[in-house]
Image (cartoon, helix red, strand yellow):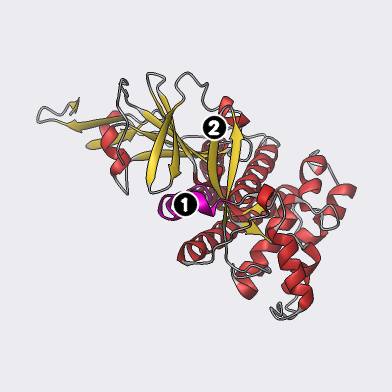
C-alpha cells in the first residue's frame, strides 16, 4: 500500500476506518485524513483533512464505519498480519465490542474467584465469542475491499437513470458469500451464548429462543423485554436477530450463500455527496422472508427456468436499496452487543482483573489502544527495562 505524501506529513499512530461497501479512510495523528476510493485500474486517495473522523463520515450515506484499526507505524500498513488493535464501530465512537469482551472476561474471573465455575465458563465464552465475531466481520470487510480493488471499473457501476443493472458472479462473489456465511455463524453463536446466560444463569430456566418473546412478556424481572423482544420477533416486522438467524440457517444448513434469484453476486453502486462520487459494493441478501422460511424448513429450492422466478430476479435486480451483507452483519453485531450490555448491567458483580506483579514478568510486549507498543525485559541485575 502506497501512502500519499505530497505536501502532507503522516504522523503515527494511524487509524483506518473501514467503511461499508469496501471503502476506507486513513487518519493520522496530526489530523491528516485521506479517503481511499478504488477507481478504474488505480487507487485514488482523496484528501479530506479536517474532517472530524468518524463523526462526519456518518454522513456518507451507506458507507458507515464498520471496523476501525490502529497501526503503530507505517510499515504495518503493508503487513498482511500486522500488530493491529481492532474494534467494531458503534456510531458513537465507542468500541463496544472491546468494552463488552473485557467486561465478560472480568465477570468470568469474578465468578471463578467465587467458586461459580458454570457462570465463569459461560461468561468467558461470551467474551471470547465477541472477539471471534469482530475478527470474522473484519475478514468480510477485506473481502469487499479486495473485490473493489481487483474488479471495479467505471463502466460496471449500476446506473438507475439509464436502467443499467450489472451483477457479477465470480470468485470474488464466492469469497464475499463464504465470508458472510462465516460471519453469520459466529454471530449466531454469540446470540446463543448471550441468551443461554440470560435464561439459564440469570432466570434459572431453560428457555428456547422461539419461546423467549412470550416468556419475557410475562416475566420481565430484569426489565429487558423492551431491549430484546423487538429484535427476536418472528412475525412481521421480523426482528433483526430473527432475520439474522434465518439467513444463517439458510446459509449454513441448506444452500450456502448461493441462494436467492441471483445466487452469489455483487454489484457496484455509487454514492454522491459533498462533491464526491464514491463507488462501493453491494452484496445483496434476498428480501423475500416467506420464501426464506420455506427454505429453512427444507422445502424445494428455486427453479431458474420458472417464469415467476425470472420475474422475481428482475424485481430484485432493480431495487434501489438492498439488504447488504456487510452492513447487515455489522448491524446485527451491534444489536447483540447492546443486548449483551443490557444483560451484564443487570449483574451486581464487579469485573475483576488477573493481577500480575512486576516479580512475575520476565519479558513482556504490551500493545496499547492507540496502536503504540511497549516492550520490557528483565536485565542481568534483575530489574525490568524498556528495550
Quick check: 136 left or right of 71? right
Tell me which residue sits at (62%, 35%) in the image: 349
Figure quadrant of residue 374: top left
Residue 204, x across and y down, in percent: 74, 53
In front: 244, or 144? 144
Instruction: Determine the residue positioned at 46% across, 66% down.
Output: 171
State the SS at label 2.
strand
- Residue 98 placed where, x, y %? 51, 37
Q: Nearer the viewer, residue 352 or 229?
A: 229
Can you say whether 60 is above or below 243 in the image? above
Q: Which residue is mark 1?
A: 153
- What's the magenta region? 130-157
The answer to whether residue 305 shows anywhere in this view is yes
Decide if residue 91 is on the left or right side of residue 74: right
* Residue 159 left/right relative to 210: left
Determine which residue is flagged by label 2.
Answer: 276
Mark nearer the N terminus (2 vs 1): 1
Amino acid at each position: 500500500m502506497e501512502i500519499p505524501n505530497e505536501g502532507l506529513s503522516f504522523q503515527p499512530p494511524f487509524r483506518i476506518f473501514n467503511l461499508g461497501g469496501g471503502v476506507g479512510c486513513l487518519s493520522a495523528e496530526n489530523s491528516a485524513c485521506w479517503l481511499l476510493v478504488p477507481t478504474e485500474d488505480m487507487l485514488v486517495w482523496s484528501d479530506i483533512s479536517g474532517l472530524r473522523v468518524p463523526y462526519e463520515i456518518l454522513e456518507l450515506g451507506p458507507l458507515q464505519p464498520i471496523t476501525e484499526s490502529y497501526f503503530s507505524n507505517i510499515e504495518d500498513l503493508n503487513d498482511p498480519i500486522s500488530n493491529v488493535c481492532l474494534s467494531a464501530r458503534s456510531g458513537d465512537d465507542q468500541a463496544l465490542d472491546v468494552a463488552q469482551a473485557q467486561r465478560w472476561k472480568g465477570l468470568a474471573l469474578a465468578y471463578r474467584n467465587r467458586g461459580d465455575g458454570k457462570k465463569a465458563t459461560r461468561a468467558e465464552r461470551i467474551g471470547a465469542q465477541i472477539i471471534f465475531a469482530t475478527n470474522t466481520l473484519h475478514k468480510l470487510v477485506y473481502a469487499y475491499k479486495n473485490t473493489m480493488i481487483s474488479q471495479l471499473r467505471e463502466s460496471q457501476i449500476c446506473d438507475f437513470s439509464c436502467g443499467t443493472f450489472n451483477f457479477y458472479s465470480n470468485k470474488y462473489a464466492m469469497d464475499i458469500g463464504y465470508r458472510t456465511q462465516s460471519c453469520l455463524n459466529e454471530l449466531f453463536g454469540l446470540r446463543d451464548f448471550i441468551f443461554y446466560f440470560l435464561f439459564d444463569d440469570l432466570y434459572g430456566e431453560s428457555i428456547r429462543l422461539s419461546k423467549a418473546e412470550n416468556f419475557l412478556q410475562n416475566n420481565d424481572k430484569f426489565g429487558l423485554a423492551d431491549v430484546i423482544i423487538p429484535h427476536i420477533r418472528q412475525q412481521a416486522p421480523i426482528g433483526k436477530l430473527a432475520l439474522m438467524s434465518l439467513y444463517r440457517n439458510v446459509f449454513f444448513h441448506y444452500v450456502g450463500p448461493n441462494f436467492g434469484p441471483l445466487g452469489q453476486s455483487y454489484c457496484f453502486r455509487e454514492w454522491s455527496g459533498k462533491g464526491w462520487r464514491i463507488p462501493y459494493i453491494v452484496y445483496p441478501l434476498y428480501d423475500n422472508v416467506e420464501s426464506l422460511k420455506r427454505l429453512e424448513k427444507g422445502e424445494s429450492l428455486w427453479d431458474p427456468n420458472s417464469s415467476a422466478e425470472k420475474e422475481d430476479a428482475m424485481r430484485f435486480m432493480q431495487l434501489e436499496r438492498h439488504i447488504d451483507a456487510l452492513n447487515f452483519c455489522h448491524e446485527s453485531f451491534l444489536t447483540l452487543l447492546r443486548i449483551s450490555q443490557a444483560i451484564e448491567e443487570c449483574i451486581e458483580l464487579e469485573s475483576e482483573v488477573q493481577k500480575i506483579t512486576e516479580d512475575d514478568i520476565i519479558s513482556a510486549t504490551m500493545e496499547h489502544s492507540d496502536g503504540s507498543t511497549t516492550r520490557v525485559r528483565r536485565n542481568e541485575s534483575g530489574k525490568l527495562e524498556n528495550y
